[in-house]
Image (cartoon, helix red, strand yellow):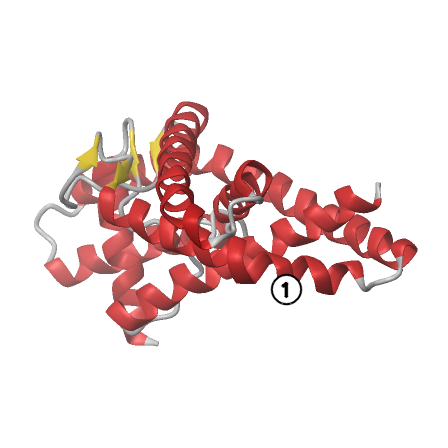
Amino acid sequence: MHDISIYFLCFMVYSFIGWVYEVSLYLVRDKVFVNRGFLNGPYLPIYGCGAMAVVLLFGDMGDLKSTPALFFSSVMVSCILEYLTSYIMEKLFHARWWDYSDNRFNLNGRICLSAAIVFGVLSVLLIKFIHPFVSGMFYKIPEVAAEIIAAFVVGFFVTDIILTVVAITGLQKRLEEAKARLEQEWQESFEASKERYAARKEQLMERLGVQHRRLIKAFPQMKTEKHDDILTEIREAIKEHTRKK
């Protein structure tokens, strides 16, 4: 039980590191802070899963001779994990959450070479330096205390998952309602000015829940099966709303 608690705490740390990495990329590129997480908290579970998979599969490959094998093995693991995650999430929630179609050497927009290389490099650092340090720190915590901390974090994590899944389930319905309302407003005010139409779009955007707006901002390349047009309109309205603040 103690080892499981330590592994879970390591998983959360690596999920947090992945979140910091993603947020930093967008902060440097767009000069705007965006919570890049699928969940509300500051963590990206796909990074935690990838890191722990590497630890469990290749934890004994930390010597210099094994570095190339560790790198290429980790690249393969990252590609398989990211592709499966993209596919499963699309089937579950009827939306494509990220798309690498504009990147060179991509496969169906789900994975790309540049992201895989980054994960390979991070995996080498993980096995050689990061995991020995992080796990060593957690093992210094008394066993009972570590299990209590892990149990608390599990509760918070599961609650976040439930809230997010509920929000995503309602997102498609909200997009349908927004699309119907936008079409109705456009038909009723076809002669109206563009300013009035833009104001109507902002009103529709504000009708979305905080969770829905966060997810749309967090995944700027997200695509849905039926409502890409209204999603684009709402995304533009969110950007306008943000610039006005």
Badge 1 amino acid: Phe
Residue to which mark 1 is pinned: 133
- Extreme left residue here? 191
Q: Is residue 88 shown above or below 135?
A: above
Q: Position of residue 206 (x, y in %)?
A: 40, 56
Which residue is found at the position 34% from the left and 50% from the top? 204
State the image quarter where residue 171 is shown: top left
Instruction: Pick the residue in front: 60 or 132.
Output: 60
Q: Is residue 55 shown above or below 42?
A: above
Quick check: can you spot residue 149? Answer: yes
- Extreme top residue here? 91
Q: Is residue 228 left or right of residue 10?
A: left
State the image quarter where residue 29 is shown: bottom left
Which residue is found at the position 27% from the left and 33% from the top? 227
SS of the residue at dot 1?
A: helix
Instruction: Pick the residue in front: 194 or 132.
Output: 132
Q: Is residue 124 left or right of residue 201?
A: right
Q: Position of residue 207 (x, y in %)?
A: 42, 51
Instruction: Pick the residue in front: 141 or 109.
Output: 141
